[in-house]
Amino acid sequence: MSEQPLKGGPLARSAALLCQDRLFRLYLDHRKRHKFGLTPDQLPDGTHNEQDARDWLCAACGIQSRAELDHNTQAAGTFRMIRKRFARWRSRLNANQ
């Protein structure tokens, strides 16, 4: 008997929307520049696309599919932490504008 693929729920949908968010992809650009000491010339804003964001999120959460977020408590916790960090970054960005 073959194993049924996991169905995504609210966290999977939230993760998909997050990856579509232009500001989240900008956050990934800024995060990568900071982590690797890159300049905006080396890694310009707008470098990460939706697929890059999906790939990064899956790797960060240790999953193969965003649907797993609704079935893996450790991955779900990591995802929630990522959302909180992004929200803090976004609020700082808005405060500086």
Image: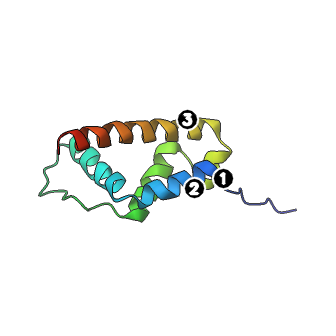
As shown in the figure, which amino acid type bears the numbered disc 3?
Gly
Return the mark for residue 13.
Answer: 2
Report which residue position mark 1 lands on. Answer: 9
- Label 1: how many Cα within 10 Å (few below 14, some 14–19, many 20+): some
Would residue 3 be seen by someone viewing this image from the given angle? Answer: yes
Disc 3: which residue: 77
Residue 43, image x, y percentages:
19, 57
**Residue 90 place in picture, x, y as percent:** 31, 43
Kindly identify which numbered label has been placed on residue 31: none
Instruction: Name the residue at 65% across, 41% down.
Output: 72
Mark 3–mark 1 distance (CA, rounded to whole Å): 15 Å
Mark 2 crowdedness (10 Å alpha carbons): few <14, some 14-19, many ≥20: some
Q: Tell me the amino acid under the disc marked 1.
A: Gly
Q: Secondary structure at mark 2?
A: helix
Question: 29 or 23: nearer the eye?
Answer: 23
Residue appearing at x 53%, y 52% in the figure: 14
